[in-house]
Amino acid sequence: MTDASNHPPMCAGPILATRKPRLALPLHAADCHCHVFGPRDRYPWVANRLYTPPPVGLDDYLAMLRVAGFERGVLVQTGLYGNDNRFLTDTLRAHSGRLRGIALIDEDITDATLRDLADAGVRGFRVNRTAKTGLAFDVARRLAERTKELGWHVQFLLDVEDHPDLDTLLGSFATEVVVDHMGRPDACKGVDAPGFQALIRLLKSGRGWAKLSAPYRTSLCEPPYDDMTPFAQALVAAAPERLVWGSDWPHVLLDKTMPNDGDLVDQIAVWIPDEAVRRRILVDNPEQLYGFERR
């Protein structure tokens, strides 16, 4: 549905009064999935955008990180800007020790531009298959060949139950791959569903990663999204060395109850009860995957 001027309606904004979590995060913890928006006069939106963002920006995101206890963040290029990654790279350069990025690209991109993105702090590119706006798998595969030397990975937003062969589909890419939001699991089908089990096989193979993020995207429950807990715990039990965590701030296109990010952080203790495993997922794995300085 669009508004009277034929533009997507504005998304609900995040809860800016982040509650301080009860869970104390380890030093150097990373939030590995967010979307941030810049001033529209400097970074114009594409005409065919999927949504109009809430009026929040980088300062709001950094404030959330401070309260929640994160030192680092990973910015995922939003389709709001299409393949114009200028806001992403400007932001990464201004916060080079603290932020990394995932870009949107296509086959027209030059090798020089790829190197510039990498120099700014980009560590991969994203493919959105749920909205059907992203690259086709064969195009992503060719781009993976080109970006392998940069140490990048390919990040996929998809529904795992659409791909019961996910481990073979993505495991043969030239680069490692990252699957967003636990693969958007189907709460009704459970952890034994073919697509989710294929995701587990992909992680165990050492060719893939998954993000423990955005449980509300497929949950049938209100916060704290108890029906997603078995999926998170199954991934942690199977391959803790192949997982990172993400807030999905500012939770765009959410038509359910808006979560408080402090509550999302406290859910980490339920999903990952072991302190040493939490440190691995929140600190060590992001250092490996995104090239944050090892401390």
Image (spheres, rainbow, N blue to C red):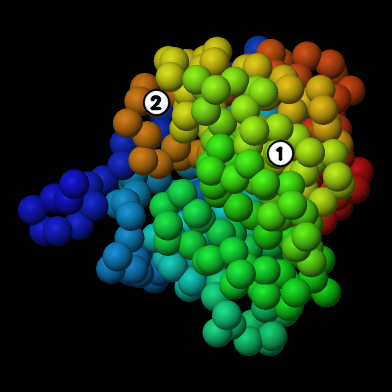
Image coords of residue 255 (percent x, y): 32, 31
Q: Residues within 10 Å of mark 2 (few under 14, many from 20)?
A: some
Question: Residue 282 occupies which quadrant of the picture?
Answer: top right
Q: Which of marks 1 and 2 is nearer the N terminus?
A: 1
Question: Horizontal placement of 146 versus 43: left or right?
Answer: right
Q: Name the amino acid, label 2.
A: Met
- Res 222 seen here: yes
Q: Point out residue 160 in the picture as x, y percentages from the top left corner.
A: 59, 40
Residue at image position (55%, 49%) is 157
Instruction: Give the residue at x 43% y 15%.
Output: 222
Q: Which mark is residue 258?
A: 2
Q: Which residue is drawn at 50% across and 49% down?
A: 35
> Foreground residue, 54 or 137?
137
Q: Nearer the viewer, mark 1 or mark 2?
A: 1
From this view, report whether residue 72 is shown above or below residue 238. below
Looking at the image, is 240 positioned above or below residue 155? Answer: above
For residue 92, say whether it is visible. no
Residue 173, label in figure: none
Position of 133 with respect to 1 (left or right) is right
Q: Which label is found at residue 198?
A: 1
Q: Which amino acid does label 1 sit on?
A: Ala
Tag 2 secondary structure: loop
Q: Residue at x 71, y 69 (%)?
A: 144
